[in-house]
Amino acid sequence: MTAVSRSLLPGSTLMLNTDFVNLKSYENKNADVLALTEKKGGMHMLYVSELHKSYRTGSRTYEVLKGVSLNVEKGEFVAVMGPSGSGKSTLLNCISCFIPYESGLITLSGEKLSGLSEEALAKVRNEKLGFVFQDFMLLDGLTVRENILLPRIIHGEVTADGEKNADRLLKLFGIDAIRDKYPAEISGGEKQRTAVARALINNPLLILADEPTGNLDSRSSRAVIDSFMEARHSLDATIFMVTYDSFAASFCDRVIILKDGTVFRTLENKGSRPEFQGQLLNMIKEMSGDDI
Amino acid sequence: MALGAGKRSLAGQLFRELFTAMAVPALSGIVLGPLFTLGIWQIFRLFLPDKEGTVLSFTPFSLIICAGFLGASLLLCFLFAIRFISRTNILDVVNEQRKSEPIRDVRSWYLPAGIFLIVFGAAAGYGHPWFFKAVFGIFSPVWANLLYLSILPGIYLIILFLVILGKRSRKHPYRKIIPRSMMKFQGRQTVNNMLIMTLLTARACFAMFYIPLLASGNFFATNAWEKDFSMRLRADQDMPDREEIEQLAEEYRLTVENWAEAPMIVLGEDGTGEDIDENGKYVYQYHEVISDCIAISASGYEALTGEHLDLSPGTYDECISQDSAYGPDTGTTLITNMVTGAALDVTYGTFHYSHTLSGFTVLNDEDFARISEGLDDSWKETFVQFDADDADSPYGPEDEYRFSQALRERLVAASSGAGMDSSYYSRAAKTYCDVHGEIYWADNEPASSVHFSREDADSFQFWSLWKYKPYFRVMEQNNFFMNMAILFLTFLFMAVICYTAALIISYTRSITVALSNRQVYEDLIHLGAGNEFRFRSVRQQLSKIYSLPTILGMTAITLFFLMILFANDGRISLSEGVGMGVCMVIMLILGAIIFLFYRRTLKTVCRMLDIRTSRV
Ligand SMILES: Nc1ncnc2c1ncn2[C@@H]1O[C@H](COP(=O)(O)OP(=O)(O)O)[C@@H](O)[C@H]1O
Ligand SMILES: [Mg+2]
């Protein structure tokens, strides 16, 4: 009972009602609760409920995520903000099943990933998820265009369709001129735009971005954020980004603030971007004020 | 490495580590080397006919060589270390580790260019003496041997091409792009290592190939001899006669069969000498007596072979062996009795195949009698050949071997003076030169290089170059391995060392590939690369590291040997073919060893990268 009620998120009142109504009839039967939440998760592109994750170092155990719940809808651009070490990367790694977690439920478009076999998981990561990392993670020996095609290459074949898609993304993100250059020969912003294009090559359900602007100056950051906006606008992509950067986050539809291993607050972007960024900065100030 | 650490303490630490890293393997090498040699020698002794006569000895000199080598490598290492330490900025050193040398542009012409350079290098390196002689009429200069070196860039280009570019299939241009791109990013180092591995493999094969080729040559040659025993007996020395030989054979429970003998004389024959003047230019000069002509009469030939020859006066026939590289000597026009000076004009008739008589000249009976007139015993010999039947001996071939040795000892003991000449030395030519006040080439050489002494009787030199070397089949076959022992040991040593080195380099290269790509493989998981995909990518890289140098090295050396075997007489003889066949088998075995090694490495690397290898 408590588990479900904690998953309630600000700004999703509708969910609260369904939850409440349905749960009544199922009482505390755990399996049924799970089945229910799974069904409910199906309504969202990404659904995370009551995620618990701790790391063990030596004899001590650190709980990093203490019941994180959130959701992302199709076509949304959502950011998770939190200070360094608050568990943002951990959250993303749990979502992509890159690391195991103790409890909680994660579904991607209704599909539970944690039970999948390794090869099936690889398939999901390849076809349904797109990744963008802070340090780009481009393959040094491949050109920009080949890097964009990498998920297709991993998939096993590069169709004419795939190549056309790559060329379209190259143009869309303004990196067509450097298509045959190697990562070592291009700027950080160009690298990250290449990474965004790579994340989009398979038309994934969801893009997971881990501090994509963390290593970039403000101009390059802007270009990368623009490419996210462009992806959402013209490709209807769903983007879930974790970041420390209030500027980057201020472009999002919704920003989830992570603190002490739980969701502290969710802010919605209703006004202009600078206004929203001001709101975010205030929130951060308030948060650190709490700490002191 | 703490950045704050002082350069001095860093240097001290580096030198200490370097010293232990060098000294430990060096010392163990010095200890294990002789043990290893001893091991090989013990195996070898199993095949030796004369276990007491041959002993392995270690000279202190080998230790001096070891010490010299160790000193040189230590010096080099420390020089590099000093250079490394003396960099102004320690950060340079740190950055050095991150710097890799990617290879950018590999063009498709690298492959044909590489093949061309290899073929050119091999052909030019091997064929330059012929070329310079034919075109410029000069002895080819020493630097021409450097032409071989063009093989190196050739192999380099081919490896570059195969590692980086490969042949991209039109249908699947992206198939192997990921492992290839990783290799590309490893860059020059990988290619350099592979070049060295190729050379080591080739060197190892080169060493290994000699043995089967020599052995098969020996086997075929000795088996083709018409008789078990054949020898030249000088008339002026106390040589055994038929009775004595038969008696000696009886002592070893053998029966002498198919005895045949014929009188033989040594004359002078004319010819055109090829010489090199001070300028390295070839000069040709006709000499009335240029070398020995070892002659038998037509009836002598019939006595030895059973074949009747009709030789017209003034013509001569030549005997050659079936696998002769040069064919019969057809150019003689004049033969001379070196005692009386009487000469006979002759023309070449034809040739006859015979292994035991190869090199002998057959004259018409009347010519033979006439030109023999006035020869003293020092120019006369008897050629003897026979078989030995060991049917009565319980020890068979062993008795035959011991009889051979006894007979050989008897022959050596009876030989002195001109009877101990080297086969290079022509007594006829020397006599002619003396009479005409000319200088014979051997006059400028130390006497010991053209005449043997009794003490040389056990040496390899004597056994292969003695002019009156008897041909005893059993002994020849048994002694082959003994005579080749040192050669064999050396070659085996080189092969083992080269092979081990190649394997170690392959292994470390593979591990480096794994370590430097750890992050990439982790990233690939994020991008949806399953276990199978990552496994294949690792396998493709490692298999290239192992297979390319192996295949290139083995192919190169095989082609090189075929070229040499073909070039020496314009064909690949049966014995050479069989020898090469054995070499192929050896290469298969080596290939199998490398394959097993590769599988082990693959497992290790996969474990390092958290890749499951259930299928391996
Ligand atoms: N593999 C790990 N083992 C132990 N502790 C870890 C591991 N990964 C992360 N942590 C710890 O978990 C906390 C959250 O890390 P992370 O998710 O990377 O934070 P963020 O991405 O928000 O900076 C940090 O305190 C970090 O030290
Ligand atoms: Mg992080």
Image (cartoon, coloured by chain):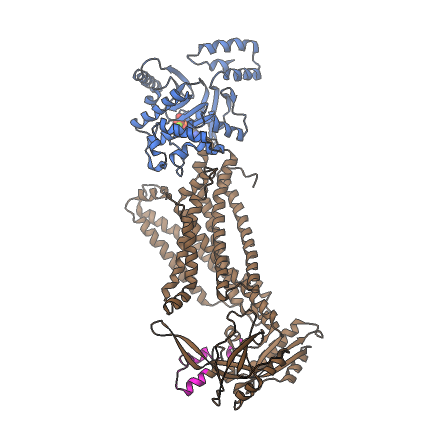
Q: Residue furthest front?
A: B312
Task: Work out whether B97 lies above or below B50.
Answer: above
Task: Work out whether B211 lies above or below B157.
Answer: below
Task: Work out whether B585 lies above or below B441.
Answer: above
Q: Is residue A49 magenta?
A: no
Chain that the image shows in brown: B
Residue range highlighted in magenta: B429-458
Q: Quadrant of the C terminus of chain B?
A: top right
Residue A89 makes an appearance in the image: yes
Q: Residue furthest left?
A: B88
Q: Position of residue B350 (x, y in %)?
A: 55, 76
Q: Is residue B448 magenta?
A: yes
Residue A57 makes an appearance in the image: no
Residue at the spot x=34%, y=51% of the render?
Answer: B81
Viewed as shown, does residue B456 lie left or right of B299?
Answer: left
Q: Position of residue B130 (x, y in %)?
A: 42, 66
Q: Position of residue B98 (x, y in %)?
A: 36, 41
Q: Position of residue B609 (x, y in %)?
A: 48, 38
Q: Quadrant of ligand 2?
A: top left
Q: Quadrant of the N terminus of chain B?
A: top left
Viewed as shown, does residue A238 lie left or right of B601?
Answer: left
Chain that the image shows in blue: A
